[in-house]
Amino acid sequence: MKKTGYLTVSHSRRALTLLLCAAVSAGMIAGSVYGAAHPHGLPAVLHQFFLPGEYGTSFFAVARNTFLSSALFIAAAYLAGLFAFGQPLGIALLVYRGFGIGASSASLYSSEGAGAALKVTLQLMPAALAFTGVAILAVRELLRVSAAILRLWTIGELKDEKLIDLRLYSVKYAVLLLLSAIISLADGAVYIVCSGSV
């Protein structure tokens, strides 16, 4: 019986991860269409600092900007998870994250042509994939806690009280912030190496 329960939980978790990946993919498609139509002047709120070297070309500027973008995303996910109806916002956040990746990639290709392939492959995509992983983890936790709060409000019971443990919830997001800081530092280093800046 335990084995069956474990398989059910594992399958459910896999299905949820696929759903979250689909949300990011949908955002990337929409962002690609938008970025191709607007190759110049993409605002920071849309490209989310996935454009290499945008708003600063030093190591610290790149690391600061990418970390700030991820930290704001994580903070939004954290707050949304504290509400019973935070689930739709979590999905919207992933679509938005994907939009920034798609728009940045398409904008680079539209403005630089085939020459952008190396920049996209070496500078944009590694950071985009890493930050997407962090975003999916953040939203998955958001969905779990938000759904638990909704269940508590509507049914008046919880399957596991740890789901609404604020301290544990906060620690998980603190770890995601730390991961974001590490990825941001790596992103800054990759930019400097690839651009040849000092």
Image (cartoon, grey):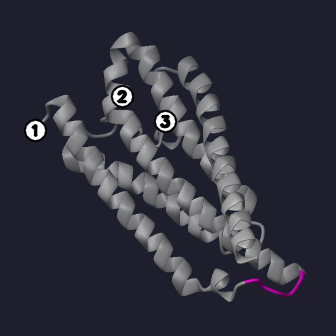
Q: Mark 3 to mark 2: distance in Å?
A: 22 Å
Residue denoted by label 1: 198
Q: x%, y% of residue 16?
A: 69, 55
Q: x%, y% of residue 151?
A: 82, 77
Q: x%, y% of residue 139?
A: 61, 60
What is the magenta range?
155-159
Q: Mark 1 to mark 2: distance in Å?
A: 21 Å
Identify the secondary structure beneath mark 2: helix
Identify the secondary structure beneath mark 1: loop
Residue type at mark 2 is Thr
Which quarter shows the N terminus? Answer: bottom right
* Mark number, residue 11: none
Tally of numbered discs: 3
Residue denoted by label 2: 121
Q: x%, y% of residue 95?
A: 64, 44
* Mark number, residue 43: 3
Question: Which image quarter: residue 160?
Answer: bottom right
